[in-house]
Amino acid sequence: MPLLLFILAVVVVLFILLLLRLFVIDKIRIDDIDDKAILITGSAGGFGRSFMLKCLENNMTVFAACRTKESAEKLRNECVGLKGHLDVFEMDISSDESVTIAKQYVTEQLNKLNKQLYAIVNNAGIQAEFLYDDFLELNDYKEAINVNTYGAIRVTKAFKNLVKKSRGRIVFCTSCICRFPAPGMGAYSTSKWALTGYLEVIRHELRDYGVDVISVEPGIYCTPLNAIEKTMKAMNATWARASNELREEYGEYWFSRGKRFFINVHDASPTDVTPVIDAYFHAITAKYPYKNYVVGLDAILLFQPFSWLPARLQELLMELLKWLSRAPKPAAVNRCRN
C-alpha cells in the first residue's frame, strides 16, 4: 500500500507540474515584444510567410529574406500597409556571397533603426529528390545539404554575433522525418539530421552568451514545399534518368504505387499550418521556451514514439507500416522469391 500511495503521489505531482507548465509558465512572454527585430529566411511562402505575417501583427520588426529578387519584390508589394516594420530583401542561403551581402544590409538597417537583432529563424529549405537511394545521385544529396544544412549554417554564422549581443534566440526548422527514417527520403533526411547535429552543438556553445538555440520539428503539412505537381514532376524525372536495368529491377508497378502513396499521404496531411507558426512564435517570444517543439499529430503520435524504440523494433514497425499501406517490394525481390 505505501508503494502504491507513493506512485500515486508522484503521478499527481507530475500532472500538476505539467499543468503549471502548460497554463502558467508557457504563457509568460518576454518584455517589449513589439520592440524586437527578427530575421526570417524563406519568407516568400509556406511557413515563413505565415510566420512573418504573425510577427507583423504583433508590431515586430521583421527582416524577411527571399531567395530571388522577383519573390522579394512580390512579397514587398503584397505586404504594403501591414502593421509592424517589414524589410524584405534578397538572400540566397546557398550562396556565401549573397549571405555576406545580406548581413551587411541588415546590419546597416538595424543601425538606422537603433535596434538589435533578437532572433534568427532558419526556415528556408527544399524538399530534395524523393525516391530510394538507388535512384539518387551524389548531386541530389549535395543540393539538399547545401540548402537545408549549409544554408542554415551560413546564415547562423553570418548573423550569430548580432544575436549574441542581444542575448536572443536562434530557431531552426528541422523535421520530424529525422525521428522517422522513411524510405525514399534519404537526401532530405540526411540534410536535416546534419542540421540537427549542428544546432545541438551550438546550443551548448552559446549558452554562456544567454542565447537560446531552438529546433522546431514539424510533421507533414501541405505547403508549397511538397506541392503534388512539383513532387510528381521531380519523381518522374528521377525515374526517367535511371538506367533501364535499374527501372527493370524495381518495376513500373513499384514506382506507380510509390507515387500513389505520396499522393495519399499529401491528401491526408493538414493544410492549416497554424500549429507550426504558433511554435515559431512561442520559440521567440516565450520567456521560457522549449528547446524542441514537436508539431503535428503525426509527429507526436508516430514519429516521436518511433524514435524512442530500439533499432530492431523500429525495423519491425516499419515493416508493419509497409504491409498496412500495401507498399510493394522491388520487382527483382519478388522474382527471386518466385
Image (cartoon, rainbow, N blue to C red):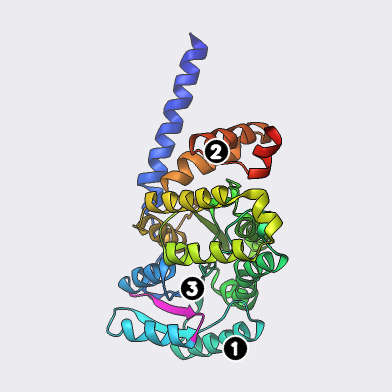
Residue 111 belongs to magenta span: no
Amino acid type at circle 3 is Gly
Nearer the camera: disc 3 or disc 2 = 2
Label 1 Cα neighbours within 10 Å, binned few <14 / some 14-19 / many ≥20:
few
What's the distance in space between the residues labelled 3 and 2, CA to CA?
A: 34 Å
**Residue 79 seen in render:** no
From the viewer's perspective, is residue 132 above or below residue 155?
Answer: above
Secondary structure at numbered mark 3: loop
Q: Which residue is pictured at 62% across the width and 77% down the height? A: 94
Secondary structure at numbered mark 1: helix
Instruction: Point out residue 135 in the picture as x, y percentages from the top left corner.
Output: 66, 58
Q: Quadrant of the C terminus?
A: top right
Q: Which mark is residue 336?
A: none
**Residue 225 seen in render:** yes
Instruction: Please indicate whether residue 138 sits to the left or right of residue 253 in the image.
Output: right
Label 2 Cα neighbours within 10 Å, binned few <14 / some 14-19 / many ≥20:
some
Instruction: Point out residue 58 in the picture as x, y percentages from the top left corner.
Output: 32, 70
Q: Which residues are magenta?
A: 59-68
Instruction: Please indicate whether residue 117 sits to the left or right of residue 46 in the image.
Output: right
Instruction: Point out residue 80 in the picture as x, y percentages from the top left corner.
Output: 30, 85
Label 3 Cα neighbours within 10 Å, binned few <14 / some 14-19 / many ≥20:
many
Pick whichever, 323 or 4, lies toward us: 323
Q: Which mark is residue 101?
A: 1
What's the distance in space between the residues labelled 3 and 1, CA to CA?
A: 17 Å
Q: Which residue is pictured at 67% across the width and 38% down the height? A: 335
Amino acid type at circle 1 is Ile
Give the labeled residue for mark 3. Answer: 42
Q: Which mark is residue 322?
A: 2
